[in-house]
Image (cartoon, rainbow, N blue to C red):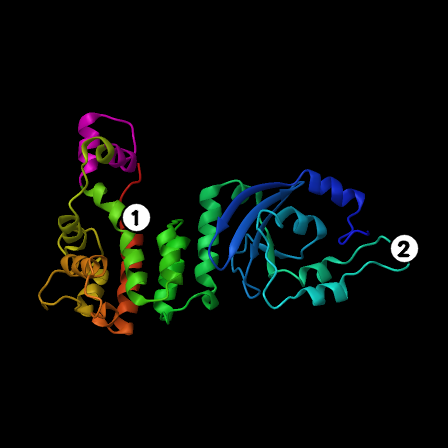
Amino acid sequence: MPHVLHIDENEFKELSRSKTLFNFELSNIRFVIINIESNYYLIAAGDAELVSNNTDLIDTKITNAIFLGCVESLKLKVPPHVNAYQIIEQIYEPTDGSDEGYSIDIICNFFEPLKVFAIPEEIARSKDLSLTIIGKMIVSNFQLKTLAFSQSTLDSFIDFFDNGFFDYNVINSFLSYCWRYSFLDVYRCLEPLFRHLVLPDLKSALGVNTSIDDLGELLDRHCGWRPQETGSMQKLFDENSGYLSESLISRFQSLSIGDDPNEKVGRSVYQLRNRIVHHQDKYSQIENKLSPDKWDLLIGCILDAIVELRNKFPYN
């Protein structure tokens, strides 16, 4: 039986020294970073239209070694439209006794689409940098989204990752199928910030050399302490606290999402969160609590608030 994909001696040597460095999986698209010899590649499976506007990533043609180096890590799938008869018609045993195999272009036709980008070693070997680049790539490929985000909100998604941050919830928000869950996912990004309102003083008083987040986890695990959510939201979004810019507070206020027009921004956002999380009436349509335009603007405002707050709070 001949080889399906013929590789020469040099390709075999490259492949024998290849190494998977990092995997990242979503339901509709999956990423892997591999190292082959002195080269590093970010490979995505699942979307033929995927593009990158990052100058550190170079669109690269797939080779035999790259394909074989990533096929197992990506758990590469055969698309539903490819059937066994198509494969038999194009990949069959040669009648002349040759053992040259088939070109990578033919083999790739039977698998879900792959996109390959050459990346610098310093990115490939840093999980934080890799996640930030993958996050930005996802939210920059607008064909992956379901909701009709405005360009302003799409820019806010991109700006989050451009600031060097990463959060799975931001990706989940971008890929969400309904407005209320998209909002809830970006709201979750605010919750880790609540401990930064009170714990820096405790850390200083104790004289401990641990991060605020680690200190918060220890207090939760051993004492059951968590920051009070209502008060934290009111403090973060209070126009007199100085945590958020006046222009951003003004944008929040213009949305008038609370039941009372005089309700504070932090409280109204928190109350909306509660309606979704504690929803019990199966006939109540929370999705219609706000118009699509208001959901969109609110999500963009929260993304911008996360960026402002993360840049303000020292993560140490």
The residue that mark 2 highlights is 97
Mark 2–mark 1 distance (CA, rounded to whole Å): 64 Å
Find residue 302 and report its horizontal and vertical position in percent: 27, 59
Number of residues whose C-alpha sits closer than 10 Å to that of mark 2, classed few (under 14), some (14–19) or many (20 or more): few
Q: Quadrant of the C terminus?
A: top left
Question: For the point 19% across and 65% down, which residue is it?
Answer: 281
| Location of residue 204 in the rendering, given as x and y in whole percent from the top left corner | 20, 30
Name, please, the residue furthest toward the right: 96
Instruction: Let me know if residue 158 is in the magenta part.
Output: no
Could you tell me residue 185's position as x and y percent? Answer: 31, 56
Residue beneath the point at 46% across and 48% down: 131
Classify residue 93 as left or right of residue 74: right
* Residue type pointed to by label 2: Gly
Q: Secondary structure at mark 2?
A: loop
Q: Is residue 211 magenta?
A: yes
Give residue 310's mark.
1
Query: Which numbered disc, 2 or 1, marks the residue that appears first in the sequence?
Result: 2
Q: Taken as a whole, is the magenta stretch helix, strand or loop?
A: helix
In the image shown, does 126 or 68 lie closer to the viewer? 68
Classed neighbour count for the residue bearing mark 1: other residues with Cα under 10 Å, few (<14), some (14–19), many (≥20): some
Q: In the picture provided, is 295 more to the left or to the right than 149?
A: left
Residue 51: which quarter of the image?
A: bottom right
Q: Is 122 drawn above or below residue 156 in the view shown?
A: above
- In the image, the segment drawn in magenta is 198-218
Q: Secondary structure at mark 1?
A: helix
The image position of residue 244, as x and y in percent, is 22, 54
